[in-house]
Amino acid sequence: MKRVLFDVAALIARVATGVIFVAHGWQKWQSGLGATTQGFREMGIPTPELAAGYATVVETVGGIFLILGLLVRPVALLLLINMLGAIMFVHGTKGVMVGEGGWELTGALGALSLLFLALGGGRISLDAIFGAIFRRRAERRTAEEELTAYGPGRTTAAGTTAGGVAGTTTTGGPTTTTGGPTTPAPAPGEQPEVPRQPDAPSTAPSSGRLNDDDMREIDALVSDEPPQHRKPPNG
């Protein structure tokens, strides 16, 4: 609420101050630059040609800018310098009252200019509108630069791909590549395959062949001699 009151008060003060400055500047334009310069010379203002041109332009153009709320702080600084010069060289030694040529009016306008220089013109102004536009553009540009900084091939969430020079890592699929050939990942619950070992040679006798003991028993039956079994060595 306080902010709204300040904006409304700043608008009213800007418009009123701007109208006063425009009226004084327009009066100088109508009198002509030569007549204004002559008047400044008679009042003892140094460099009257430069001072007359400065006062005429700043009061007219600066007053219009104050009404619109455009470049309020720079314009307020120029108007403040104009009023300080008027007080210093013309009205400062003539008292306060404007009827006696005092600094009453120039002091009030200078104080208002100082206030605008310090606080600005409020949110009901062209400065506030243009400032909001430029600020949104800057925020949009910053957001675009942040998005561009990630770029394609960056991992930002599950299911996206992170790219690199040595290899890529895909978080949304069953394949994991770290710079070498692709190796399928085992399915859930499946045991990894173990390489098959070569079969060892079998030492059991074959069912279709006879060993030495069988041959000796057959010979014993044919020759009617009891079978002789070979004693083991050291038996």
Image: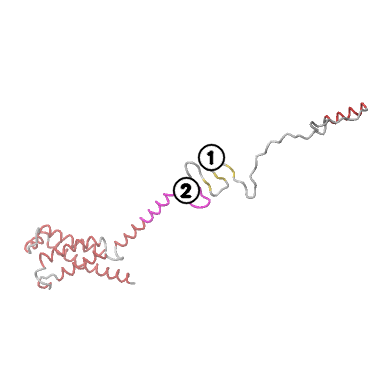
Question: Looking at the image, which residue is at 90% across and 28% down?
Answer: 220
**Distance of mark 1 from mark 2, alpha carbons?**
20 Å
The image position of residue 229, as x and y in percent, is 85, 31
Alpha-carbon neighbours of circle 2 within 10 Å: few (<14), some, or many (≥20)?
A: some
Quarter where residue 43 is shown? bottom left
Of the 4 image quadrants, the one containing the C terminus is top right
> Amino acid under label 2?
Arg
Query: Would residue 197 be found to the left or right of residue 164 on screen?
Result: right
* Mark 1 / mark 2, whichever is N-terminal: 2
> Amino acid under label 1?
Gly
92 vs 193: above or below: below
The residue that disc 1 covers is 180
- SS class, disc 2: loop
The image position of residue 33, as x and y in percent, is 12, 59
Query: Would residue 69 be found to the left or right of residue 168 on screen?
Result: left
Q: Residue furthest top?
A: 223
The residue that disc 2 covers is 154
